Image (tube, rainbow, N blue to C red):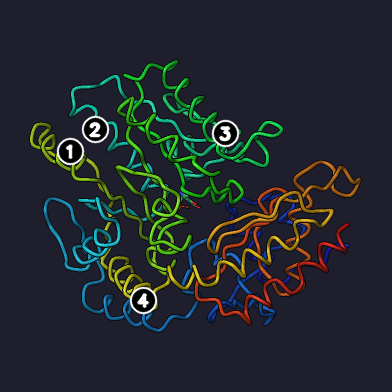
Amino acid sequence: MTKPLTNMQTRDVEALLHPYTNAVMHREVGAHVIERGEGVYVYDDQGRRFIEGMAGLWCCGLGFGDRELIETAQAQLEKLPYYHLFGGRSHEPAIELAEKIKDLAPGMARVFYQSSGSEANETQIKLAWYYNNAMGRPEKKKIISRVKGYHGVSIVSASLTGLPYNHKSFDLPVDRIHHTATPHHWRGAEPGESEADFSARLAREFDEMIEAEGPDTVAAFIAEPVMGAGGVIAPPEGYFEAITPVLAKHDVLCIADEVICGFGRTGEWFGHQRLGMKPNAISMAKQLTGGYVPLSAVAIDAQMAEVIERHTGEVGIFGHGFTYGGHPLGCAVGSAAIDIYRRRDIPARVRALEPEFQRRLRSYADHPLVGEARGIGLLGALELTPGGTAMFDPVGKVGPYLAMRLLEHGVILRAIGDTLAFCPPMTISEDELDQLFAPIERCLDETL
Ligand code: PLP
């Protein structure tokens, strides 16, 4: 029997429509109301403490309550709480953050700001189209993303996203967006096919798709170095190395969606550096500000920047920009976050924690409920195989059930269908990692 809703839960169901939530079930079970956070922990309105195994939504890489970020935000609000970059205005926090991003991402020449990851990818597609118009190739506009890729929820970014719930009943995807295969060896490989052979096959299929669409009609390929919301899927050996020559052959731009992988998460500053991807443009958000303030950035290489800047002279104006793009608060906090990542050498810290984190994840690989234990850096997943048990039929239910059981043991993880995702703050200590993993075996056993 479900418990009666608290006063706060009643107010919640009467006032909010929740993202990624079944509103009918939500009305039954009520909201989990989080009140405050400190370090790797959050506390709910009943005073219970939870270890945040997902860094919020893959964004609070520095945990909660970081004094430096809070004091930077306060100082910036007092000095200049708002300004914009329209029509040639500027401010130092925006300039300084762009300089720091360029330092971390060699090859990138210019930075454009928005507030969210979706808007960053929306900008990317507009830039790819603007670029090809500038190049005198008005037909070269199609974009290829991947099944299970996640790029956001605005009309175009949701179309890039390759997940059914983002399309169903929203009349998406829009035209000119196509999806190629997920590079998931465990699910997608033929029997006996090695990772390298699987990568080579996917690259061949990708090449065939571009040939079938017509290379003169394909503008860009967008991919996360490690797929996040599609189930934490790191590419198999040689994947981006096999894709890169196909992009070069057809003069197709490569966009790295680093919204989750950026700023140390995979053990390098950016995921593309770890996974061998060679982008012309990069999307960043989430850990850009440690999740404390909404801000996203798009960085483009010198060739794109030169063509786009020149074209603005011909068009008359670069007709794109958001009121809150490059908000001084976000830029100041982003700048401070990068200082902290550098000072604490967060990529090195992730590399140091990675072996133990991945060893623990993989220690569940032989559990009867686990199909695959996988991950890279401080990103991980347990893909569960309910095996058609009556309790968890149809598929897609065992993940949420397990996440709910773990919550009872003080651990917050995210169920993506039957996959349990892990993305703890990158500041997590070894003791806190113990706490994160402590109840997992028991909850798996009890769910059998
Ligand atoms: N791109 C990636 C890789 C993401 O993981 C997300 C969000 O999870 C987005 C884009 C969209 O970002 P936002 O929710 O800030 O619009």
User: Mark 3, residues whose alpha carbon is within 10 Å: few (<14), some, or many (≥20)?
Assistant: some
What kind of element bears circle 1? helix
Of mark 2 and mark 4, the one earlier in the sequence is 2
State the residue position of label 3.
197
Q: Please tell me in which quadrant of the rendered image residue 307 appears.
A: top left
Which is more foreground, mark 3 or mark 4?
A: 3
Residue 436 place in picture, x, y as percent: 67, 73
- Of labels 3 and 4, earlier in sequence is 3
State whether label 1 is within 8 Å of ligand 1.
no
Q: What residue type is labelled 1?
A: Ile
Q: Residue at x 33, y 70 (%)?
A: 338
Residue 27 occupies which quadrant of the picture? bottom right
Q: Which of marks 3 and 1 is nearer the N terminus?
A: 3
Q: Mark 1 points at which residue?
A: 308
Query: Can residue 392 be seen in this snapshot?
Result: yes
Q: From the viewer's perspective, is residue 149 above or below residue 143?
A: below
- Does residue 156 appear left or right of residue 410 in this picture? left
Cα distance in 3D space between marks 2 and 4: 36 Å
374 or 331: nearer the viewer: 374
Residue carrying label 4: 340
Q: Could you tell me the amino acid type at mark 3? A: Asp
Judged left or right of residue 38, residue 81 is left
Mark 1 nearby-residue class (10 Å; few <14, some 14–19, many ≥20): many
Q: Which residue is at a point 55% across and 65% down the rendered structure image?
A: 56
Judge depth for marks 2 and 4 and give the one in front: 4
Which amino acid type corresponds to the residue marked 4 in the rendered image?
A: Ile
Can you identify the residue that label 2 sits on? 130
Across and down, in percent, residue 291 comes to: 44, 66
Q: Quadrant of the C terminus?
A: bottom right
Mark 1 vs 2: CB contact within 8 A: yes
